[in-house]
């Protein structure tokens, strides 16, 4: 994989104390992951199966795809020429089926929930600008159970991910890039 790809190894353990700035401790069986280039950090279930990305997926800006019994996640990056946070904000706020909230102390993290979900649609998403100026979007889909009912665990999991998503500057960390 190209330089700067997702660092799951060290960040899973190292990010937790730093991200817990406001005592944002995760429930058991969750861990933090981070993408060093953009400084995007968010939690995932510890037993999330990480997929091997195809060259086509990587070319489309997909950085991570993970599967779990209750949730499927995708992390994707967009260059400013393709889409900015403001562009995405305008687009998603115009979508009639998107319930949009702004999170973070400065409202710089956009969380949206699909009010007309289906088994094949994006159920929720989180968008933020990374420290590198690019748009990062975490998409949440149903898991292997394909349950998107109002009581499905995927909704609670999406909210947990949104509540704990943040930016972190990894430039001073002694991390090796995954190749």
Image (cartoon, rainbow, N blue to C red):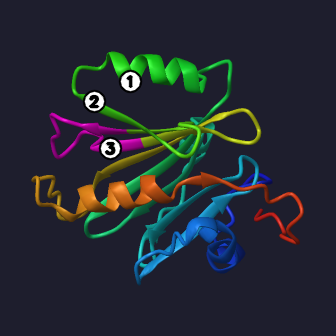
Q: Residue at x 83, y 70 (%)?
A: 175
Left or right: residue 122 versus residue 24 is: left
Q: Position of residue 133 (x, y in %)?
A: 73, 33
Mark pair 1, 2: CA separation: 7 Å
User: Does 118 appear in magenta?
Assistant: yes
Q: Quadrant of the C terminus?
A: bottom right
Tell me, for residue 92, which label it has, or none. 1
Question: Badge 2, how many Cα within 10 Å: few under 14, some, many 20+?
Answer: some
Residue 136, by quadrant, is: top right
The residue shown at (10%, 53%) is: 149
Q: Is residue 105 above or below residue 42?
A: above
Q: Earlier in the sequence, mark 1 or mark 2?
A: 1
Instruction: Measuring from the top left, give residue 130's x and y in whole percent.
Output: 68, 41
Seen at 30% across and 40% down, the residue is: 122
Dot 3: element: strand
Extreme residue in the bottom direction: 28
Q: How many marks?
A: 3
Relative image position of residue 46 (x, y in whole percent): 45, 78
Foreground pick, 110 / 142: 110
Asked if labels 3 and 1 touch by Cβ distance under 8 angstroms, the answer is no
Q: Which residue is mark 2?
A: 98
Which is nearer the eye, 54 or 79?
79
Within 10 Å of disc 1 (Cα), the crowding (few <14, some 14-19, many 20+) is some
* Mark 3: few/some/many CA within 10 Å (<14, 14-19, 20+): many
Q: Is residue 98 left or right of residue 79?
A: left
Task: Give the overall secondary structure of the magenta segment.
Answer: loop
Going from N to C along the chain, the mark reached first, 3 or 2, is 2
Circles 1 and 2: CB atoms closer than 8 Å:
yes
3D distance between C-alphas at marks 3 and 2: 9 Å
Which segment did they paint magenta? 112-125
* C-alpha gap between disc 1 and disc 3: 11 Å
């Amino acid at each position: 994989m190209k330089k700067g790809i997702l660092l799951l190894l060290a960040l899973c353990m190292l990010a937790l104390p730093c991200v817990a700035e406001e005592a944002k401790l995760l429930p058991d069986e969750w861990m933090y992951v981070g993408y060093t280039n953009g400084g995007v950090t968010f939690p995932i279930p510890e037993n999330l199966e990480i997929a091997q990305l195809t060259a086509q997926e990587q070319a489309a800006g997909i950085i991570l795809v993970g599967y779990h019994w209750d949730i499927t996640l995708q992390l994707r990056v967009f260059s400013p020429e393709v889409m900015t946070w403001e562009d995405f904000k305008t687009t998603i706020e115009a979508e009639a089926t998107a319930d949009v909230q702004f999170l973070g102390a400065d409202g710089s993290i956009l969380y949206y929930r699909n009010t007309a979900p289906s088994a094949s649609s994006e159920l929720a998403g989180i968008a933020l600008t990374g420290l590198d100026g690019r748009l990062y979007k975490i998409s949440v889909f149903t898991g292997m159970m394909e349950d998107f009912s109002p009581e499905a665990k995927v909704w609670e999991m999406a909210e947990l991910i949104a509540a704990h998503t943040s930016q972190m500057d990894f430039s001073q960390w002694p991390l090796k890039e995954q190749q």
